[in-house]
Image (cartoon, grey):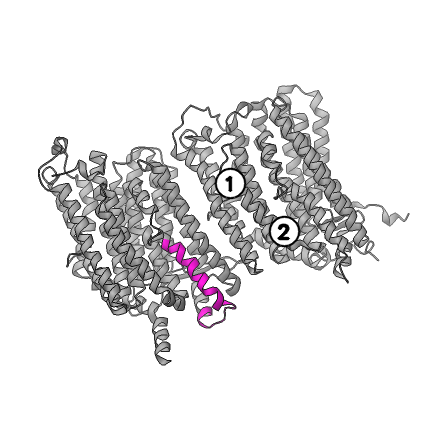
Amino acid sequence: MNSANLPVGADYLRILPELVLTVFGLAIMLLDPLLHEEENRKTLGAIGLAGAVVALLSTLWMAGSPGYAFWNMVRVDGFSVFFHVLVLAVTVVLILTSYEYMSVQRIRAGEYYGLILFGAVGMCLMSSAVELVLIFIALEISSISTYILAGFRRRFAISSESSLKYFLLGSFATAFFLYGVSLMFGATGSTNIDEISKALTSGSVPTLAYLAMALMFIGLGFKIAAAPFHVWTPDVYEGAPAPIVGFMSTAPKAAAFAVLLRIIFEANAPGRFWLIWISAALSMTLGNTAALVQSNIKRLLAYSSIAHAGYMLVAFAADPELGASAVMFYAASYAAMNVGAFAVVSHFANLGERYVTLEDYEGLGRRAPVLAGALGIFLISLIGIPVTGGFFAKFYVFSAALKSNLIWLTLIGVINSAIGAYYYLRVIVVMYMREAREEVPVLPIPTALAAALVISLAATIYLGVLPGPVLDYAQRSAKQLVHGGVSTAAGPSDRVQIFQPK
Amino acid sequence: MNTSFLDPIILTLVTFIPAAGGILLLLFPRRHRDIRIFALIVTMLTFGLSLHLVANFHRKQTEFHYLIDRQWISTPNIHYHMGVDGISMWLVLLTTFLTPLCVLISWKSIQERVKEFFILLLILETALIGVFTSLDLFLFYFFWESTLIPMGLLIGIYGHGRKVYAAVKFFLYTMIASVFMLAALLWLYAKVGSFDFFSIQNAIRAGQVEGFATAAPWLFLGFFIAFAVKVPLFPFHTWLPDAHVEAPTAGSVLLAGVLLKMGTYGILRFNLGLFPDQSRHNAPWIAVLALIGIVYGALVAMVQPNMKRVIAYSSVSHLGFVVLGIFSFTQAGLNGAMFVMLAHGVSTGALFMLAGIIYERKHTYEIADMGGLATPMPKYATFFSFIVLASVGLPLLNGFVGEFLVLTGAFLAHPWWGAVGATGVIWSACYLLWMYQRVFFGKVTHPENSTLPDISPREQLALWPTAVAALAMGVAPLLWLNIIDPAIQNTLAPFAQIASKVVGQ
């Protein structure tokens, strides 16, 4: 074997965030048994936080050298950098939220922070992998971590139920994905996204490719909680620890959307239109109507996340460039508002997550004005009212859809977002306009949580007032994604010549 | 004093000073008196600045004034584009005029969560002014939706009775309706590539919008539904009585005084401005709905046992006049419609303040619990009668001019529209005067009413401006109409062409 075929420094630089996360994750696992339980929560949390922040910084470094790595399996481009930043920012906020949560809930912290970092490795890799098998492996890394994290409230049967349900259905779904990958290999002779794209765009599309696309969509549809593969969502969200739900509903979901974007818009997988159309319409309608009758805030937000997956899917049926950038923007603003909402929910839940029904939120506006105000802004953003990121997110998705003449789907979408307003509003109404029937204790706001809230609030408002920069970035990387290759947009990379496919 | 250096930034100042004041209030300690005084200063300052708009307005210049056009977001192409003409300027002024009065009238009645109340009120003012000054459709929609949250919270937190029900109903009705406007707006953007009002208008007029002919009826409806719910036009009016009755006084004043005008303003600016053919085409059924609104609103108002409900339904009736005037497509009709909007804002605002004053004393709006109030509260009775007469349409007071013009326009368009509409004037005299009689005349029927204190100097301070405005608008309507008319003629210009096209055939 030629020495040129061994990985070089640039290869490692292009997976630097993943490496950083792994090292910090391992450090947490090693330190865990050496520390006393009470103090390890704080220390390990700090290490986890440091890991996520360093990974975030190394992403910025990585962004400076776009190109392929590890024999065309990984590609750093604007697109993967965007999702790296997204996933890592969510991880930072999650760790900040968990900081206090862990001691309130009396949960052992070691594996918890470790698994969060390992999960983030998988999610980051999902966005930069351009090889279906590697995507599958990354998907599994991220999924297995989240399966375990969902069951972390060990003392509660409902949490174990959540974890088990997630695990069983999730592995079933990834099997579908793997099946789709193998059929795609059969249809095109490759598992590399670029080569698949070449095979599918030159000449006739084999029938097998349609089936492969459908199967992969089932697998990913499960991960993004799109109807009709959404049934697990409310139960899993109800049982899992609240900060983890905030994480599950944003980071792995964003990563799965990244994979879907790669498969649909970069690999040009065939037969997307009706698949997406039906799934989007179903997700929006089922998610919103079911959320109307929920009385548990976690279930309510679970159904809301199904609905939001539906809005994002709308963009997949649109013109590739417009659609991809709309999805990216949506993923970012949804992450900001949802992770923030769950930060409030998890703080307010208190010991054993006792206070998670809407009744417990009565009079919160008076008793905890800061928390209620923050949650109110996140909910307003979820409704899609101006001055918040949620508004522009919906706006871009629907305008992309209209530009592609998807008038009916847009109409279903806008009507759904009006229906959605009702249940978010119900929470605001309960917080501000009802008097508390019983005194529900509210803990003082710890610094870490305050930081988490400030970050997500700032992101939500920033995306709602000055969406330009983020959207411009998304559009540039979407263009790159759709028209193929880093070489056009970011200049030829050092490794591309050696490994150019024959 | 030469203040023309303010011209390019005046609209930004007027729009955002209230919200900036609201944000400053966040930092205030919870001393209620300071908060109230600060809110009063901010709203007075805004009113003072808005007078600059009138002072430097050039009547002869038919284009928009005080334009400012900056790029806000590059993709999509959204501009911070503001400007006022004779129509929107008066509505801005109406808003800045009413808000300080709202602060005064809420001085005593709001005792809990005072800080939040005034923050919401100030943010609401910004959103309302923004609706009238925006010339970018996106910016317009942005402000339009922004009014919902503060208003909804004002009703839901500070209202009484079934306040939560009323707040949610208000929010959902208007939110769902404006979603259709958003869809229409996005369609226009997809085809024109701009949200700019003038660009879209020119593209439509020049026939450069692909597929416009088939989409126009739907676009017209999309905008119209959003506006009709806000007006509210029969049969979309059911949210209004609930919202009004349960809202706190200041909320009712702004709701009736300004929020409803957002709907009629929208129809005037966007439905007529962008879709003249469709407006013409749909005028018959809309005018019929307006007529039903006039008569139905009046008849229902007559049998209400609750003072605030009477005023609320009278709004349905009066706003029917506005819509009728607009869809008469005559110069008189449109001028009248605009004048009714302003007059209704002043006198209904005052009526709600008067209702609030009695509520502060008796904690009820039931007419049956009043009776003979003229004896213990003579000053109150005088103000009330003056405003009732203005609202009824007594010549030389503000209600008369607008209704007269609207009816003239309606007669010109279709004699029977005018005939049916004219009955509305009679009805309004019936329900308002009857209510006045039951509340104030005769002996004091409930002994506890005989000791009610008359209105305080602060309350008088809130009422005098409305009374003066009502009189001034009635005696010298030309001060207003001279500025309104050129803008109306501008709006009507494409209609003259349509008419001549029809005649030419």
Q: Nearer the observer, disc 1 or disc 2? A: 2
Q: In the rendered view, would you say A110 is above or below B315?
A: above
Magenta region includes residue B224:
yes
Q: Residues within 10 Å of mark 2 (few under 14, many from 20)?
A: many
> Disc 2 sits on a residue from what chain?
A
Residue type at mark 1?
A: Leu
Q: Position of residue B145 (x, y in %)?
A: 42, 50
Residue bounds of the magenta highlight: B203-228
Q: In the rendered view, would you say A318 is above or below B382?
A: below
Using the image as rendered, state which of residue B491 and residue B175 is in the foreground.
B175
Q: Residues within 10 Å of mark 1 (few under 14, many from 20)?
A: many
Q: Is residue B306 left or right of residue B141?
A: left
Q: Is residue A19 left or right of residue A279?
A: right
Q: Position of residue A175 (x, y in %)?
A: 74, 40
Looking at the figure, which quarter contains the C terminus of chain A? bottom right
Q: Position of residue B320 (x, y in %)?
A: 28, 56
Q: Position of residue A289 (x, y in %)?
A: 51, 42
Residue B12 visible? no
Q: Return the mark for residue A457.
A: 1
Identify the residue under disc 2: A276
Q: Main secondary structure of the magenta part?
A: helix
Residue type at mark 2?
A: Ile
Does dot 2 land on a helix, a strand or a loop? helix
Magenta region includes residue A300:
no
Circle count: 2
Q: Residue at x 71, y 38 (%)?
A: A172
Does dot 1 land on a helix, a strand or a loop? helix
Q: Earlier in the sequence, mark 1 or mark 2?
A: 2
Q: Residue at x 67, y 26 (%)?
A: A110
